[in-house]
Image (spheres, helix red, strand yellow):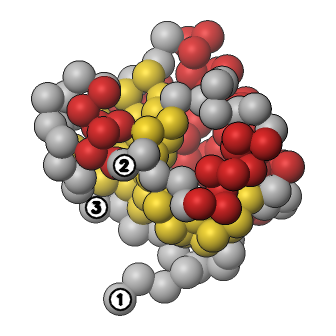
């Protein structure tokens, strides 16, 4: 059983850095068809939570070059969390990395629509769709 204050990394070769997770955000890393998937659960809000996501993605993206952030279990996000998503998208785009977001819940999706971020971020309705869009050829999740 996964606890909220730990980060589970299934493949230490894929994600060598140890991530400090805040009790309100857990990040789990797995691989599917050559694409890394960051599964976030909890809240992406101002403080350590947003920093945890940024640190995890900052360490992993240059190595993987193709990453999908699974937002399925994200309960809430605030302006700082939205800012982190935009910052990560801009950084990935400038560096030529592929970053996609998958399956935000209804509340998170509404917030992304209200802030007009749906047009800026590459967001897919399901994790399988996001994985398929990376060209990995797989529609399976890890």
Q: Residue 50 location, x and y as percent? A: 73, 54
Q: Residue 34 location, x and y as percent? A: 21, 33
- Relative to 45, is 38 on the left or the right? left
Of mark 2 and mark 1, the one earlier in the sequence is 1
Judge depth for marks 3 and 1 and give the one in front: 1
Give the residue at x 52% y 29%. Answer: 122
Compared to residue 82, the image places residue 75 above or below, namely below
Answer whether residue 64 is visible to the viewer in this image: yes
Q: CA distance from mark 3 to mark 1?
A: 14 Å
Of mark 3 and mark 1, the one earlier in the sequence is 1
Q: Pointer 2: residues within 10 angstroms few (<14), some, or many (20+)?
A: some
Name the residue tied to disc 1. Answer: 1
Q: Residue 103 location, x and y as percent? A: 46, 52
Compared to residue 142, the image places residue 67 above or below, namely above
**In the picture, residue 58 is in which quadrant?**
top right
Q: Residue furthest bottom?
A: 1
Answer whether residue 21 is visible to the viewer in this image: no
Name the residue tied to disc 2. Answer: 126
Compared to residue 119, the image places residue 127 above or below, namely below
Q: Residue 114 location, x and y as percent? A: 79, 42
Name the residue tied to disc 3. Answer: 10
Judge depth for marks 3 and 2 and give the one in front: 2
Do callouts 3 and 2 mark residues in contact (Cβ within 8 Å)?
no
Give the residue at x 84% y 49%. Answer: 80
Of mark 3 and mark 2, the one earlier in the sequence is 3
**Which structural element holds mark 3?**
loop
């Amino acid at each position: 059983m996964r606890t909220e204050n730990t980060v589970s990394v299934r493949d230490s070769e894929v994600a060598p850095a140890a991530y400090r997770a805040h009790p309100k955000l857990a990040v789990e890393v797995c691989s599917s068809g050559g694409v890394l998937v960051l599964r976030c659960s909890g809240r992406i809000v101002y403080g350590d939570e947003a920093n945890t996501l940024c640190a995890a993605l900052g360490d992993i993206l240059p190595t993987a070059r193709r990453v999908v952030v699974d937002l399925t279990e994200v309960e809430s996000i605030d302006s700082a969390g939205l800012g982190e998503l935009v910052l990560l998208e801009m950084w990935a785009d400038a560096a030529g990395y592929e970053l996609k977001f998958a399956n935000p819940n209804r509340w998170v999706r509404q917030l992304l629509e209200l802030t007009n971020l749906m047009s800026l971020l590459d967001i897919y309705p399901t994790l399988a769709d996001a994985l398929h869009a990376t060209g990995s050829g797989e529609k399976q999740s890890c």
